[in-house]
Amino acid sequence: MFNYTDLIGVQYKKDGRDIKGLDCYGLVKTLHDRMGKHMPDYATPDEQSLINQLINMGKSDCEELAEQEPGCIVLFKIPPFSLHMGVVLDKERFVHIIQHKNVAVERLDSRIWSKLRVGYYRWKI
């Protein structure tokens, strides 16, 4: 599928797009690049245009999934932020990075993440 283990522990950096530092969108973009799927770059993970595309579906290269699958994007709504995202590894886990934490693997069914989840999406191109 894709290698992510070399990114575990990489530090959070706003607008980060490489191993020197990543934000959540930078991590998702990096992992999709490794899968041969090329997502557009955005200045920040908070930029509303990507969020609107992912949620509205008709304007993007994504499709909503009924359930998770390895390599898909998992979206979360975390107040006060509008969006957080990660990449699903398997039925139980996802990889992500969030401000003040490094890249890590967490459980999809945890009390926190399961309540904040918006949905699962597959980037098609």
Image: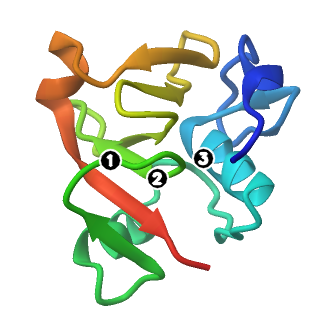
Tell whether 40 sits left or right of 5.
left
- Tags 1 and 3 in contact by the CB under 8 Å rule? no
Q: Which mark is residue 68?
A: 1
- Tags 1 and 2 in contact by the CB under 8 Å rule? yes
Q: Nearer the viewer, mark 2 or mark 3?
A: 2
Tell whether 20 sits left or right of 96.
right
Residue lying furthest left: 115
Tell whether 125 sits left or right of 45.
right
Tell whether 43 sits left or right of 72.
right
Where residue 111 sits: x, y (%)? 15, 12
Q: Nearer the viewer, residue 104 or 99?
A: 104
The quarter holding residue 23 reads top right
Rendered view: 23 above or below 110: below
The kind of residue tagged 1 is Gln
The kind of residue tagged 2 is Cys
Where residue 10 sits: x, y (%)? 76, 18
Classify mark 3: residues with Cα within 10 Å, few (<14), some (14-19) or many (20+). many
Residue at 42 percent across and 71 percent down: it is 49
In three-dimensional space, the C-alpha distance between marks 1 and 3, rounded to whole angstroms, equals 15 Å
- Tags 2 and 3 in contact by the CB under 8 Å rule? no
Q: Residue under label 3, please give it.
A: 28
Residue at 57 percent across and 47 percent down: it is 25
The kind of residue tagged 3 is Val
Query: Which color scheme does this rendered protein use?
Result: rainbow
Badge 2 marks a residue whose secondary structure is: loop
Q: Residue under label 2, please give it.
A: 72
Badge 1 marks a residue whose secondary structure is: loop
Q: Nearer the viewer, residue 104 or 35?
A: 35
Residue at 42 percent across and 83 percent down: it is 60
Badge 3 marks a residue whose secondary structure is: helix
Where residue 84 sits: x, y (%)? 38, 39
Residue at 49 percent across and 45 percent down: it is 70
